[in-house]
Amino acid sequence: MIHLPCRWINRRRDDGDTVSVTMISNFLWRVRLRDIDCPERNTQEGIAAKHFTESVLEEAASELSAEFLVPHKIRSMVWRCEPINLLDWPSFNRVVGDIWVGESNRLSELLVAAGHAKRT
């Protein structure tokens, strides 16, 4: 499990339960929030979830950290700053994990509490 400070990157293709962050030599990670499901981004509810996620991440920019499992092959390439072969990535070129806001708030729990996501 990797747990490191991160910086949020606002990307158009992300939605309420998938966010992009940079860590480790500014490598871009797409993190799919675990244990929740937000409505699809092409629905009104999905747009609201995306906007909620963006507002939380903008407010907490300096207090973000990410925690996720990374396949060993990718983890070793990242630590050595080697190029990543996208064929080594899990599906949808993203990892499953948590984004922490401050020390005790998981972004996924904030989404559920606000009514923008369901637990899976």
Image (tube, rainbow, N blue to C red):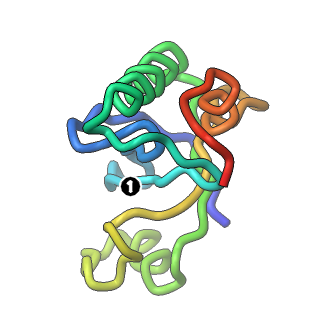
Q: Name the quarter where the N terminus is drawn.
A: bottom right
Q: Is residue 27 above or below residue 118?
A: below
Image coordinates of residue 38 in percent, x first then y, are: 49, 41
The amino acid on which the numbered mark 1 sits, given as a three-letter code, is Trp
- The residue closer to the viewer here, 70 or 109, is 109
**Which quadrant holds residue 42?**
top left
Image coordinates of residue 9 in percent, x first then y, are: 32, 35
The residue beneath circle 1 is 29
**Which quadrant holds residue 94?**
bottom left
Q: Is residue 4 visible?
A: no
Circle 1 SS class: strand
Number of marks present in the image shown: 1
| Residue at 48% over, 54% down | 32
Around disc 1, counting alpha carbons within 10 Å, would you say few (fewer than 14), some (14 to 19), or many (20 or more)? some
Judged from this view, the residue extending furthest toward the left is 12
Indicate left or right for 41 with 116 as reference.
Answer: left
| Residue at 53% over, 83% down | 72
